[in-house]
Image: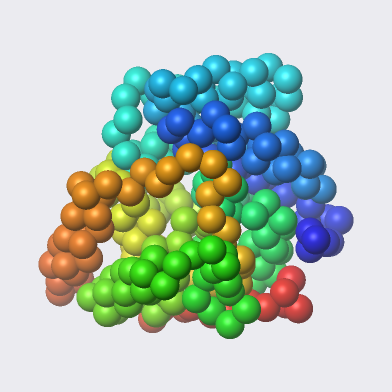
């Protein structure tokens, strides 16, 4: 069930940036569900890293059929972080009020997007995190014990090293104000892979942006396999101490403002 938000908020200019690599089996269904949301200000930007399975061609077909969809084709698979940086940069040039990050594989339920947008507009947050690890957040039932433990440990490790009071620091379902993204200097980020999620949240907190976490249910991917390889895991492990070192002695812009929003607040 999709959370209703006030009519005057529904037309907010919101661009969803959705990186893809070999997601031909998932993309059409995810895009259709997303575009069916009662958000007339919604746009979808698909960022395809030259998928050999034809995902880029499917993305072009979606764009030809719906003017709300556009496609950014990249010539190589350079990592999730690089794809997001390129996509967010392109999205910002069109002047949205907010930009959301969302996976194409079905793990991020589209009905949570109005909740993230409503939380941002209700609280003035620069970053809203769709969180698995706040009260009300859930993981898919078919996640095994080992996978749950690894995810929880990765969050605890990054949070402990960086001292950032966000419970789901590795979350990939996020919504940003355009102003907060402009402060990140995306071209200068260290992260190429999944650690982009950690680095950007860390920088947002350091810059003094208000962060709100909204509980979501995180599903397992509908089709295909995870893109998490050894190089990505290595980067994710090394990034937190490197960020801590890079920012040693630098003064925070403000005390961290991290809050939890319930659906009753939206």
Q: Is residue 122 visible?
A: yes
Residue 234 or residue 114, whichever sits in front: 234
| Left or right of residue 232: residue 3 | right
**Quarter occupied by the C terminus:** bottom right
Residue 198 or residue 248, whichever sits in front: 198
Q: Residue at x 50, y 20 (%)?
A: 54
| Left or right of residue 35: residue 202 | left
| Left or right of residue 260: residue 190 | left
Give the image location of residue 146, x and y in percent: 36, 69
Q: Is residue 94 visible?
A: no
Q: Residue at x 17, y 60 (%)?
A: 238
Residue placed furthest toward the right: 7
Residue 204 or residue 114, whichever sits in front: 114
Quarter where residue 187 is shown:
top left
**Quarter occupied by the N terminus:** bottom right
Q: Residue at x 65, y 32 (%)?
A: 28
- Would you place residue 46 above or below residue 199 in this image? above
Q: Residue at x 40, y 28 (%)?
A: 49
Give the image location of residue 68, x and y in percent: 70, 30
Quarter where residue 135 is shown:
bottom right
**Total tally of numbered discs in the picture:** 0
- Would you place residue 149 above or below residue 197 in this image? below
Give the image location of residue 174, x and y in percent: 53, 57
């Amino acid at each position: 069930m999709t959370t209703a938000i006030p009519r005057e908020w529904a037309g907010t200019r919101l661009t969803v940036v959705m990186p893809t690599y070999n997601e031909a089996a998932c993309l059409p269904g995810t895009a259709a569900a997303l575009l069916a949301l009662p958000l007339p200000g919604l746009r979808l930007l698909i960022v395809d890293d030259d998928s050999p399975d034809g995902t880029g061609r499917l993305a072009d077909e979606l764009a030809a059929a719906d003017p709300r969809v556009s496609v950014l084709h990249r010539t190589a698979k350079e990592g999730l972080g690089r794809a997001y940086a390129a996509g967010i940069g392109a999205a910002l040039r069109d002047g949205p009020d907010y930009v959301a990050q969302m996976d194409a594989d079905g793990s991020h339920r589209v009905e949570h997007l109005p909740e993230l947008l409503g939380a941002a507009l209700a609280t003035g947050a620069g970053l809203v995190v769709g969180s698995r690890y706040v009260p009300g957040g859930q993981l898919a039932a078919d996640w095994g014990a080992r996978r749950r433990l690894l995810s929880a440990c990765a969050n605890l490790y990054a949070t402990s090293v960086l001292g950032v009071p966000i419970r789901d620091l590795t979350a990939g379902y996020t919504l940003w104000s355009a102003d907060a993204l402009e402060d990140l200097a995306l071209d200068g980020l260290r992260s190429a892979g999944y650690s982009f999620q950690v680095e950007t949240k860390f920088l947002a907190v350091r810059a003094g942006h208000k962060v709100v976490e909204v509980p979501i249910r995180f599903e397992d991917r509908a089709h295909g396999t995870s893109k998490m390889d050894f190089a990505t895991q290595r980067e994710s492990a090394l990034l937190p101490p490197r960020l801590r070192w890079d920012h040693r002695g630098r003064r925070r812009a403000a005390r961290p403002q991290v809050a939890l929003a319930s659906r009753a607040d939206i």
